Amino acid sequence: MVVSTFHPRTLPPMLRRNYGRELVAWAFLPIMLGGIQGGAMGVVLKKTFAGIPGLPEAGLDLAVAAIAAATAIGNLTSGAWATAANGRRKVPFLSGLMLATSGCVACMAFIPRTAFGAWMLVGLVILGWIFWSAVVTIRTSVWRANYPDANRTRITGRLATVQVLVMAAGGFIIGWSLDQSVESIRFLFPILATFGVVGAIVYGGVRLRGQSRLARAERQGHRSERPAVNPLSVLRVLGEDHRYAGYMACMMLFGTGNLMISPTLVIILEDEFETSYQTGILITTVVPLVVMPFAIPIWARLLDRMHVISFRAIHSWSFVLASAVFLVATEYHLLPLLFVASALLGIGFGGGMLAWNLGHQHFAPPHRDSQYMSVHVMLTGLRGLIAPFLGVAIFTALAARGHPGMIYAVTLGLNIAGAMGFLVLRAKYKTAAPPAG
């Protein structure tokens, strides 16, 4: 059975205990993450607060863009978190951050249905992502220390599969519950937060192999090799590693296009299609997440065989296709085709999750892992802070002319530009093999 392939006994004995604990933790934590997931919470915000006095439609759309930018705002703090975690025990640090994120989700139960409440929801989602961005940045160091190169991509793929399936279930529950009664928000989010607390406690039992050695190497490393809050450290890393700089430049183009999709899709589903909570969350969140586990093993095998630049030169075209289908579906008002586009987006997300978590390791030496990852996260945060607001502004202008779907012509152009950039990098550096260490 497929499920049996996730069992710890399929791995070498020395990896089983840590993997088993992580597997259980990631079966609980994603339920909580549904409370800060951009697509689902964008739908919740748009539908719950529509028509509220003191909150005009333009202001609500701006709030939706802010929800979409929450991940990016969190990512911009990654340098500070990487600095704070440098030389410290990683697992307890991560567990504390998981608990803090769960606290943000629990507080959503107390949000009033007013204009202030709408922005309070936005604030809690942003704060949750500030804590969670640290988890994303620091956990790669745990994976690198605990799992050898030969097993790391496969293990990461399994954990990602569990995460997205559980998160999809959480999104479905949120949509169904709110369709029954908007007031279910009062007990729904504390339940989600409880799952996060359990996951954090379980994760606390993970043992980081070579913790003392890693902490010593981080503390003794040259000042320039440590993660830093100073944005100039990003420029220093990119100036030293031109290949990584080229990769980040292509990611900036490619990622900007992708990050425009979510907030505009939330607005289009409500304004153009008038969907329910559940239908909106199915398209923005559940369908992509359900598709991802089927795509992840295929993408993982591909990433195992090649450098991440070569991988992105292939993988990026999945987002090009998704943008093209979103364009057709929206312009011709074809709701069923939006489900197809959403599924294509999930295929792209499956490979993107792997490459996003592991791609920097194809460039970084082990003792600079967190530094390279923090550069990647901070640049993702920069484009993620700009793209949702830019996307909503472009969408508003195009919708006023009667062509709201043309926003996806813009995302399509940016995706194609990024994909072509990866092809140029692949030809320039002839990257064909995964990293050696």
Image (cartoon, helix red, strand yellow):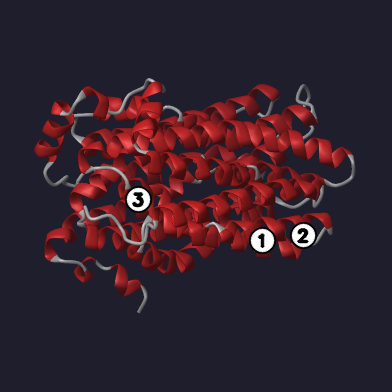
Camera-side residue of 436 and 226: 436
Give residue 214's position: percent from left, percent from top.
Answer: 15, 38
Q: Residues within 10 Å of mark 3 (few under 14, many from 20)?
A: many
- Name the mark on residue 333: none
The outermost residue toward the right is: 401
Q: Distance between the Cα atoms at labels 3 and 2?
A: 33 Å
The amino acid on which the numbered mark 1 sits, given as a three-letter code, is Ala
Report x, y in % for residue 151.
24, 62
Nearest to viewer (mark 3 / mark 1):
3
**Looking at the picture, how far across and down is residue 121, in whole percent?**
58, 30
Residue matched to label 2: 329
Q: What is the distance, in whole Å, between disc 3 and disc 1 at their CAs?
A: 26 Å
* SS at badge 1: helix
The label shown at residue 341 is 1
Q: Residue at x 57, y 61 (%)?
A: 318
Residue sitting at x 38%, y 20%: 230
Amino acid type of the residue that numbered disc 3 sits on in the rendered structure? Leu
Position of 206 compared to 432: left or right?
A: left
Q: Which residue is mark 3?
A: 358
CB atoms of marks 1 and 2 within 8 Å? yes
In this orientation, does residue 247 appear? yes
CA separation in Å, label 1 and label 2? 8 Å
Q: Residue at x 59, y 41 (%)?
A: 256
The N terminus - image quarter = bottom left
Secondary structure category for the residue under label 3: helix
> Disc 2 marks which amino acid?
Ala
